[in-house]
Image (tube, rainbow, N blue to C red):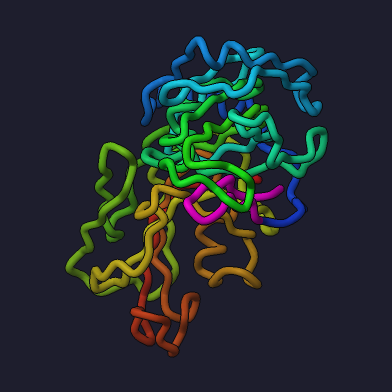
Amino acid sequence: MRKLISLSAVALLLTGCASTAEEPVDPASYAAMSAGLTANCEAFTTGDAVKQIKVSGDFGVSPTVEFPTPLSGTGVETAVVFEGNGGAVVGNQRVALHFTGYNAATGEQFQGSEFGTEDYIIQDIVEGGLPDFCSALSGVQVGSRVAVLLDAENAHQNAGVESLGIGPEDGIIFIFDVVNAYLPKAVGEAKAPEAGLPTVILAPDGQPGIQIPASDAPAEFKRSVLTEGAGEAIAIGDTVVVHYSGWTWQGEQFDSSWTSKAPASFTVSSDNLIEGFVQALEGVKVGSQVVAVIPSELGYGDAAQGSIPAGSTLIFVIDVLGKE
């Protein structure tokens, strides 16, 4: 697995490492859990220009791509080459893709993943992102192959990418195989919260806030499942995709993945995470939201950590979005 297609005025970067993960979560599971979600971006639109791109080859196999040059469109245009039967991309989420990219003006290929392998791309699809993949892929079903044409503004804000031979007026073409999608927030059955723990209040997009009881912090680790998902249970050693927010018991927020709208990935192991975070995740099903109160001995102990004072009791609200 590799991470993140990113076009900027300086360069188009594709960074990451080879995957040691299992196959992505069964798309049927995402389809079931995501069925009631509201899209965060308007559904993709097509256009006359993108329809001039001819794509052949099976899903998961490197495509043959033909198009006239120079090819230019308006905004973001998407054409479905063939449609999958998984759940639809809704935006503000992580998506697994195979892809190949072309300069629409010159026809030159500039990047691509290794189709037919697990060396797929993990891309965060967020509102306002550049390139505008949220507009390109919202409404596309997992298992689909699509052709996407972005004009220069929506690809790189007319800055070009000199290192790749992409000029300021050049559009970009991507052919995407949508391998999998991960939930944008917790989805499942609401559960009664445990007494004495912080109350979690959710914004419409799922971002949590908390109200902390006036009582002293619990002396022992506490975890309460607030939403129980229907996905696979998390085990030690799994790599999970999560949204999380963290506070001290005094109410000071010290971290949140929601700030950037991009979730985080962690390997569930005390080699990578504080022990309390591992305990908060172990056995929890994909789709769930939990609130965990972590005493200092399962957190950072007697050492200060950034803005977190030494000896702090920590509160985490975690949405388990998928397993890589």
> Compared to 255, does 161 lie above or below?
above
> Compared to 147, does 222 lie above or below?
below
Depth check, front residue: 274 or 233: 274
Residue sitting at the far left: 214
**What's the residue at 66%, 13% (across, down)?**
82
**What's the residue at 51%, 56% (across, down)?**
10
**What's the residue at 50%, 59% (across, down)?**
280
> Compared to 173, does 279 lie above or below?
below
Horizontal side of residue 168 vs 309, given as left or right: right
Depth check, front residue: 143 or 249: 143
Horizontal side of residue 39 vs 3, given as left or right: left
Depth check, front residue: 254 or 247: 254
Task: Locate the C terminus by quadrant.
Answer: top right
Say if the magenta span includes residue 11.
Answer: yes
Horizontal side of residue 250 vs 118, given as left or right: left
> Compared to 207, does 134 lie above or below?
above
User: What segment is highlighted magenta in the picture?
Assistant: 1-15
Residue sitting at the far bottom: 302
Q: Quadrant of residue 145?
A: top right
Q: Residue 5, position in %: x, y?
A: 58, 45
Say if the magenta span includes residue 162.
Answer: no
Residue 242 can be seen, yes or no: yes
Q: Residue 86, position in %: x, y?
A: 60, 21
Q: Quadrant of residue 296?
A: bottom left
Residue 33 can be seen, yes or no: no
Q: Residue 179, position in %: x, y?
A: 67, 31
Q: Residue 119, position in %: x, y?
A: 76, 44
Magenta: main secondary structure equals strand
**What's the residue at 38%, 85% (across, down)?**
311
Label total for image: 0
Depth check, front residue: 247 or 307: 307
